[in-house]
Amino acid sequence: MKVLLVGGGGREHALAWRLAQSPLLAKLWCAPGNPGIAAVAECVNIPAEDILALVAFATREAVDLVICGPEAPLTLGLADACAEAGLRCFGPSAAAARLEGSKTFTKEVCDAAGVPTAAWKRFEDADEARAYVQVMGAPIVVKADGLAAGKGVVVAATLEEAQDAITAIMDDRSLGNAGAAVVIEEFMAGEEVSFFALCDGAEALPLIGAQDHKRVGDGDTGPNTGGMGAYSPAPAFTDALREEVMARIIRPSLAEMARRGTPFRGVLFAGLMLTPAGPRLIEYNVRFGDPECQVLMLRLRGDLLAALDAACAGRLAQVALDWSPDPALVVVMAARGYPGTPEKGSVIGGLDEAAAIPGVTVFHAGTAQREDGAIVANGGRVLGIAATAPTLRAARDAAYAAVDALDWPEGFCRRDIGWRALPAPG
Ligand code: AMP
Ligand code: GLY
């Protein structure tokens, strides 16, 4: 099969690395890709959001399957444009991608399907939102209704924080038009797990769970990020919980999407809160998580390309995937300044030394290659230092040994990835 992978981050490097191992693969392109991806695919200089150029390229090269990594091209209609051009695309239509693009839409689907989630109310008027928060009390959660790259959620411990968040999002439009409306949610307490299921519109195939570390600093301090590290399995997420999530959350949501005439095909990423009353949905995303995808790909044993192809063809019922029992863990290396404005251009040394440590795979996220061949930082999250080993402790030790093998003073990482499942490193 000829495959075009869309995106250029750590998630896409992990997908490309796994796809490249498929016996079904004849040719892999990645648009736009990155210097790490270039080792396993041919990178094409088309931005991930240039739908027309992507479809033109895929048509010209007679691509058999387009696989979309990030959410933005999906919400812009990549899968729809592929379908119109007679191309197959792994990823939902724009209508189904609203599960990530609109928090209100997701809540409506959940309510119609009876999916357990936080009680909620949507406001287009800031004064009404403030009055509602005053009545409900704190803690309470304020969310911008539109896509805000993970920055649109404020978990407010006090009423004052909640009021300030409404003012910033709605009055000051700190997140632009994503703040035209807010969703105010009940606060749910518990442990968070990321769970993934492949969907073909009718059937869902459970993948595995992972835990992410969203705050930038050790001990879960500082501002939220896209994710500073992840590990799998998540000990709190048992097989019984997975079956409960499939039965009470994933399958009812899928059935409701089909009932609405917008069946969901692609990977459904459920952010779950494991509450004392059982698992509840925090949110859906319509793509693999990053960095979660990196640990999933390390543990996947079956053929990724065959599974994604089956999801597109409505043949998911025939697929069984196998997972390594060995845990995997990824430490994200970010450029100084992240999650604010990261410094770009610093040279990263020691990549080969890091990758030579047994069990370690180095995924590129925000890197670029200079004309002289040097790999430099070119984004906020720059590298995913991933490792797998027979125990989570050994995987963590290998990943941090690789971090320490890097020569990149301008980079930083959290030192406590995996802390929920392990005591802090020595
Ligand atoms: P979201 O973008 O909706 O995933 O929210 C980002 C983060 O905010 C989540 O990963 C949770 O840690 C937290 N969060 C969101 N909604 C709630 C809620 N209703 N109760 C508690 N925490 C929440
Ligand atoms: N790591 C969380 C996400 O991809 O949204």
Image: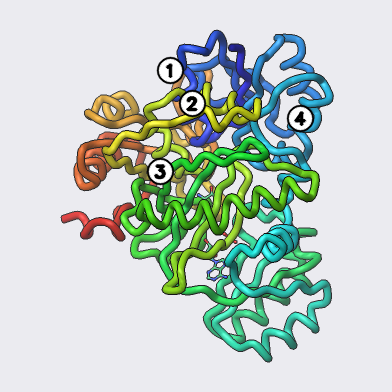
Q: Position of residue 337 (x, y in %)?
A: 50, 52
The mark that comes first in sequence, 4 or 2, is 4
The residue singled out by tag 4 in the image is: 50
Question: Between residues 41 and 243, which one lies in front from this camera angle?
Answer: 243
Residue 52 image label: none
Residue 21: which disc?
A: 1
Q: Amino acid at mark 4?
A: Asp
Residue positioned 63% across, 35% down in the render: 200
Q: Which circle marks residue 333 in the picture?
A: 3
Using the image, determine if residue 335 lies above or below residue 349.
below
Among numbered discs 4 and 3, the one appearing first in the sequence: 4
Residue that carries the numbered disc 2 in the rendered image? 304
Q: Nearer the viewer, mark 4 or mark 1?
A: 1
Contact check, label 4 and label 2, Cβ < 8 Å: no
Q: Is residue 320 above or below residue 100?
A: above
Few, some or many C-alpha atoms within 10 Å of disc 1 (few <14, some 14-19, many ≥20)?
A: few
